[in-house]
Amino acid sequence: MMKNKQVDAYIAKSAEFAKPILMHLRELVHQACPDVEEVIKWGFPNFDYKGVMCNMAGFKQHCSFGFWKYSLMKDPKGILSPRNEGGSMGNFNRITSLKDLPSSKILLGFIKQAVELNEKEIKRPVKTTPKGTKTIATPDYLQKVLKKNKKVYEIFENFAYSHRKEYIQWFEEAKTEETRNKRIAQAIEWISEGKGRNWKYVKKA
């Protein structure tokens, strides 16, 4: 099992109630995917395998665990909840003890689905509104980055539909989290200058 010392430190610094939860989730991920890579992103542990797969986090009063492509996963019993429902960024609402989690068998099944989605390079769909409205939803991960810079956020929000769509599709097409983050960093620079994704190819008047 390949463990990241940063994740070890993260769990060690977590609240006492959170430690057994985080250790349990970690063990299950490695059991389902022996080749998984542990990384710290956005300040909490993420598990990557041919791209981001799932993540977990410990807070003062609860933990969270969620899948990157949960909207594409089979969930006949309706166990997975949308992110941010109940104040949690994961798919199992606020986890305060091991009793709040489904059985190990169910969790392993979900993790294996996440592995398969990444192996098949199936991408998350870009959320758009119905045809004819000319608007496109901004992914949560992009909202968080944009809101850190008021100027960039306002520019992006006022961009034409085509510009917003070009950028979002560019991010969503990234095969790895690292590639997507690099694209976002580059995009922030261009957006701050009022440039569209394909500004290099726009003919000058």
Image: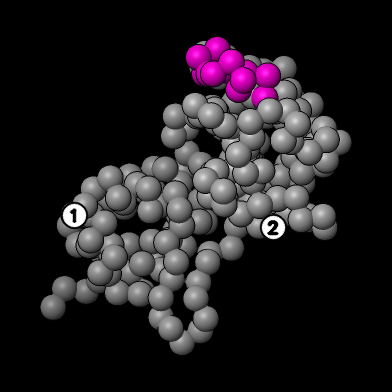
Left or right of residue 40, residue 82 in this image: right
Residue at numbered disc 2: 72
Relative vertical location of residue 106 with respect to residue 164 in this rendering, above or below: above
SS of the residue under disc 2:
helix
Residue 87 in percent (x, y) is at: 52, 46
The residue type indicated by label 2 comes to Leu
Residue 174 in percent (x, y) is at: 51, 51
Image quadrant where residue 152 sits: bottom left
SS of the residue under disc 1:
helix
Can residue 201 be found in the magenta stretch? no
Judge by depth and name the residue closer to the eye, 169 or 83.
Answer: 83
Residue at image point 53% right, 50% down: 84
Name the main secondary structure of what is drawn in magenta.
Answer: helix
- The magenta segment: 10-21
Residue at image point 34% right, 47% down: 145
The residue type indicated by label 1 comes to Lys
Residue at numbered disc 1: 151
Relative vertical location of residue 181 with respect to residue 29 in this rendering, above or below: below
Does residue 106 appear anywhere in the picture? yes
